[in-house]
Amino acid sequence: MNRFDRKYKKLARSISPLDLTSNFSQEDLSWDDFFTDRSNTNSSSLFLGKYSEDGIKFVMERFGLDRQARHLGIRHLAVGVDTRDPYRHRLTIYNGRHRDRDHIVMDFVARYQHLVPKDIDADIEYTHQLKVLMIEWLQLQNPTAVFTHRRPALPGQLYPGLGLGDQLMALFTLMGRHLQVDGIINVPEHFHTGLIFSRRFVFLSPHVQALVQQIGQDLWKKYRLGVIAWASATESIINIETGQPQIWEPRRQIIPIQSQLRQYFKSNDYIGIAQNLEEDKVFSLDEEKLREAFSKMEQPPFQF
């Protein structure tokens, strides 16, 4: 549990369904609105069937995300919800009124899915069907910031990140409980994303979990995140046991919400395998290969 979990959980108790589904700002509430039954709000217009644009704005204000955004130089958060595809919803938060990629703060695409983990990942032993929220796309960035030597561009980044990872992970967990799903699944495209998200998400496969933990353990002793991220992207992380580059293949990771599922990821069936595998591989970074890859780039992200 990070330091935001208890705080956000307490705040969530003070939020009503009306706050989340209403299509008007709190300032626009009239006395009559408190006596109006809005339980039949058209869910097809709500993000994931639960959240209106005004409801999302209310959540951002209640949890202080708008205030934190202002500290980052983002003065005005505008919310856009696209529910035209009934199975795949999109939430985009912009900085200001311009709705283009250079003003995106968050872009979030998700859908509900029923799955049996064992059917999609042979390494896992969990055989019960789950209802999950599948994150198809997640982009978090500060379009007002610039990259520096201390905070260089990571693979796939157009702008620096927000630095609000712990807050957002706590909100994801609360959202999963509110949506009554068994878990939230993400498939990180890049190794560094999976490494960062593994503070809250766990990989379905104990083999992949062990791999990510071991690489992080071996390389974080000496290198910062930017170096590790680009080493993975340029196939410069070497498995000492085989002498071959460790190629990143995107795999599913999950925030387990349902109690039985949480217990599985704490069990010997899962942790025992992951811990045993961690001892089998040791990783190094081929600095010469990374430098050579940088030398071929028109604009390398940093000097190494």
Image: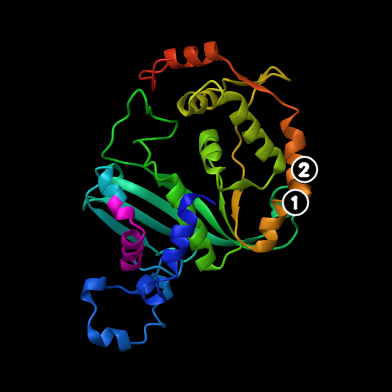
Q: Which of marks 2 and 1 is nearer the N terminus?
A: 1
Residue 68 in view (yes/no)? yes
Q: What residue lies at 52% left-to-right and 26% top-to-bottom?
A: 228
Q: Name the foreground residue: 151 vs 98.
A: 151
Callout 1, which amino acid? Ser
Q: What residue lies at 73% left-to-right and 44% top-to-bottom?
A: 271
> Mark 2 touching mark 1, by CB under 8 A?
yes
The residue tagged with tag 2: helix, strand or loop?
A: helix
Main secondary structure along the magenta-highlighted residues: helix
Q: Name the foreground residue: 7 vs 125.
A: 7
Disc 1 crowd rating (10 Å Cα; few below 14, some 14-19, many 20+) is few
Q: Position of residue 126 (x, y in %)?
A: 74, 55
Q: Is 224 drawn above or below residue 303 in the view shown?
A: below
Q: Position of residue 99 (x, y in %)?
A: 26, 51
Q: What residue lies at 31% left-to-right and 67% top-to-bottom?
A: 54
Identify the residue under disc 2: 272
Label for residue 267?
1
- Compared across the picture, whether 151 is left or right of 143 comes to right
